[in-house]
Amino acid sequence: MSVSEQQVENAIKEIIDPNLEQDLVAAKCVKSTNISNGSVSVDVELGYPAKGYIDELATMLKEKIQAIEGVTEAKINISSKIVSHTVQKGVKPIEGVKNIIAIASGKGGVGKSTTAVNLALALQVEGANVGILDADIYGPSQPRMLGGNKKPESADGKSLEPVVQHGIQSMSIGYLIEEETPMIWRGPMVTQALEQLLNDTHWHDLDYLIVDLPPGTGDIQLTLAQKVPVSGAVIVTTPQDISLLDARKGLKMFDKVEVKVLGIIENMSIHICSNCGHEEHIFGSGGGGRLADDENVALLGALPLDKQIREQVDGGNPTVAADPDGRISQIYREIARRVAAKLALSAKDHSAKFPTIVIQNN
């Protein structure tokens, strides 16, 4: 019995990608299907990095296709291709950076910076080229979290080379000042410093630049929304009501400035006692999910309240770098895949394909 392409397509449609939340045909990830004497070969191209998921997906596809009557073997080839996605109108892309993802929170103390650095590391482990920009000028924390105390170098005397720690490119005002030095600057100086850190850093072929924003909805956030090409934003919150109130403000702010919110991460979701294993929702439960439902955005994942996460970032060796195969790192990697997959479903930026027209008077 001969096998048709429609049969193969129908089999593929039965698998819903948990990151894209749709089947691979609908997501336009199936690039080619070849059938020859019962042998089926399928090429799949994901728009997000997925090293930790590719084998599982290949196995599921193989089982579905081999279940078709007449199929003797199934060959599945899965790859990832990360492209640039659209940003706010009137904002130019930054050279060397395909996509900028802002990590924000309405209030401090929710673990946003810890989440940002582990998310950056998780995207890298999944196969992307990643950088992180510490946009908190008053309280930079990424140098400590990444274990870096180097001064950035300048090859040309004009731009700064990013500091590479744990395989990711990074830049922070913290690399340029002493750790104990307070930044006693007014708003305009702070926003100018952010622009310089972003634009005067020689980023090298980044798929994603994670921007760790300070808490709130002030000058820095406004500058980011108006002058920085942001592909998407992620809101970090705890389940606590007071944290959710401020997280909602942050979400509304991005909505007003036309930056797509990719979803919400609920941090400190549950505490598991290291002695007895008792589980307790210290900051309440389900708050992130309710906020996601109310605002019609995705709940990207929930992270536990675990002293190991705190100890590792304090020591300059974040969880995903310290224990890439551990359970908490796996949660970060699952969230990273969902964040990148949500972005992959956004409109692509084709501006680089259009020629620049120069008019000359001869």
Image (cartoon, grey):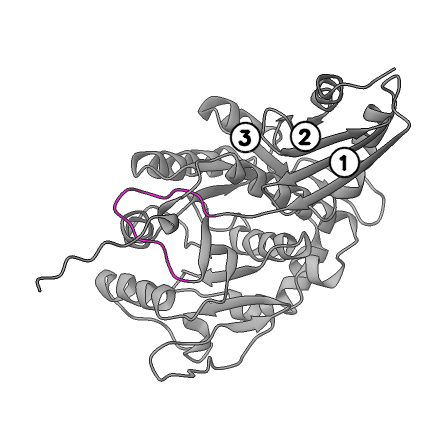
Question: In this figure, which residue is indicated by the disc labeled 1?
Answer: 57
Residue drawn at x 55%, y 48% is 82
Name the quadrant containing residue 36.
top right
Left or right, 257 with respect to 301, comes to left
What amino acid is found at the position of numbered circle 1 in the picture?
Answer: Leu
Label 3: which secondary element: loop
Residue 191 in view in this figure: yes
Task: Estimate the spatial distance between the alpha carbons at disc 3 and disc 2, rounded to whole Å.
Answer: 15 Å
Residue 268 in view in this figure: no
What amino acid is found at the position of numbered circle 2 in the picture?
Answer: Asp
What amino acid is found at the position of numbered circle 3 in the picture?
Answer: Ala
* Residue 44 in magenta stretch: no
Q: Give the percent coordinates (x, y) of residue 202.
A: 43, 71
Label 2: which secondary element: strand
Towards the viewer: 38 or 302: 38
* Crowding near the residue tagged with mark 2, few <14, some 14–19, many ≥20 C-alpha atoms within 10 Å: some
The range drawn in magenta is 84-95
Sooner in the amino-acid sequence: mark 3 or mark 2: 2
Sooner in the amino-acid sequence: mark 1 or mark 2: 2
Question: In this figure, which residue is indicated by the disc labeled 3?
Answer: 298
Task: Estimate the spatial distance between the alpha carbons at disc 1 and disc 2, rounded to whole Å.
Answer: 8 Å
Image quadrant containing the C terminus? bottom left
> Main SS type for the magenta part?
loop
Q: Give the percent coordinates (x, y) of residue 299.
A: 57, 32
Question: In this figure, which residue is indicated by the disc labeled 2?
Answer: 17
Sooner in the amino-acid sequence: mark 3 or mark 1: 1
Number of callouts: 3
Task: Estimate the spatial distance between the alpha carbons at disc 3 and disc 1, rounded to whole Å.
Answer: 22 Å
Towards the viewer: 261 or 105: 261
Label 1: which secondary element: helix
Q: Are marks 1 and 2 in contact (CB under 8 Å)?
A: yes
Give the number of the disc on residue 339: none
